[in-house]
Image (spheres, helix red, strand yellow):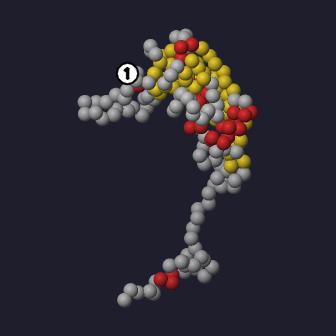
Amino acid sequence: MKSNHDGGEKPAFSYPVKVGNISANAVMVKLEADARELEALAKVWRVDVVKSLKAELQMARWKKDGVRLKGDVKAEIVQSCVVTLEPVASTIKEHFEQIFVPEGSKLARIVTNEVSEMVLDPDGPDLPEAFSGDTIDAGEVVAEFAALAIDPYPRKPGIEFKDHIEGDPNEKGGRPNPFAALKDWKKD
C-alpha cells in the first residue's frame, strides 16, 4: 500500500495523519465517507453502490518510530448477483490492525533463517507497512480492509447455480455432440 501520494492519484477515501502528531497514548478517531467519497469507492471497488463507510480506530505510536492503527470498519454496499444480476445488499464488518514503520527501518525487515529462506507465520501478525515522508493515510487503510472483505461472488439468498449437464447424444431430444461428425473420419 502506498502511504505517500506525491503527485499521484488521490485515493477514493483519504484521511492523512502526520506521524509526528501521534502520541504514545492511543487516540480514538471516527471516520465517515461523504457522498463524493462513497461514489468514488463504488468505482474503485467495482460495486453498484456504496451506501456507507464508517470506521472507528485507535492511533498510537508503536516502538520508537512506528505507528499502530487498529479498529473496526463497517460498510453497506450493493452488488449485482452473479446468477440473476439483481441487486444484493450486504454489510461489511471487519476488525483490522496495521503497523507502519519508516522506510528503511530494521523493524520492516523480513526474518530469514540461516539459509536465507523467508519465515512467515500464516497465523501470525502481518508484516509492518513501510511509509515514506511524515504522513500515513488512515482513510486508505480503512478502505483497503473494507475492500478485502467484499464478497467477490455475491448471490441473492436461496439462489444457486444449477448444474450444467450436456445432453446425452444417445437421447433423441438431447443436444447433439459437436464431434459426432468426426467419429467416422479416418486419417489415410
Question: x%, y% of residue 79?
Answer: 68, 45
Q: Is residue 150 left or right of residue 35?
A: left
Residue depicted at x 62% and y 57% = 161
Residue carrying label 1: 106
Q: Tell me if I can see residue 125 in this picture.
A: no
Residue 3 horizontal/vertical position (percent) = 53, 28
Q: Residue furthest right?
A: 35
Q: Secondary structure at mark 1?
A: helix
Of all residues, the one furthest to the bottom in this rendering is 188
* Residue 180 appears in the figure: yes
Query: In the picture provided, is 110 more to the left or to the right than 53?
Result: left
Residue projecting furthest to the front: 7
Q: Which is nearer the eye, 148 or 121? A: 148
Residue at image location 46% in from the left, 83% down from the top: 183
- Relative to 130, is 151 above or below? below
User: Does 128 appear above or below 39?
Assistant: above
Label 1 environment density (alpha carbons within 10 Å; few <14, some 14–19, many ≥20): few
The quadrant of the picture occupied by the C terminus is bottom left
Asked if residue 37 is positioned above or below residue 184 in the image, the reply reads: above
Residue 141 in which image quadrant = top right
Indicate the position of residue 69 as horizontal and vertical percent values. 55, 22
Q: Nearer the viewer, residue 10 or 164?
A: 10
Question: Given the image, on which type of amino acid does mark 1 rest?
Answer: Lys
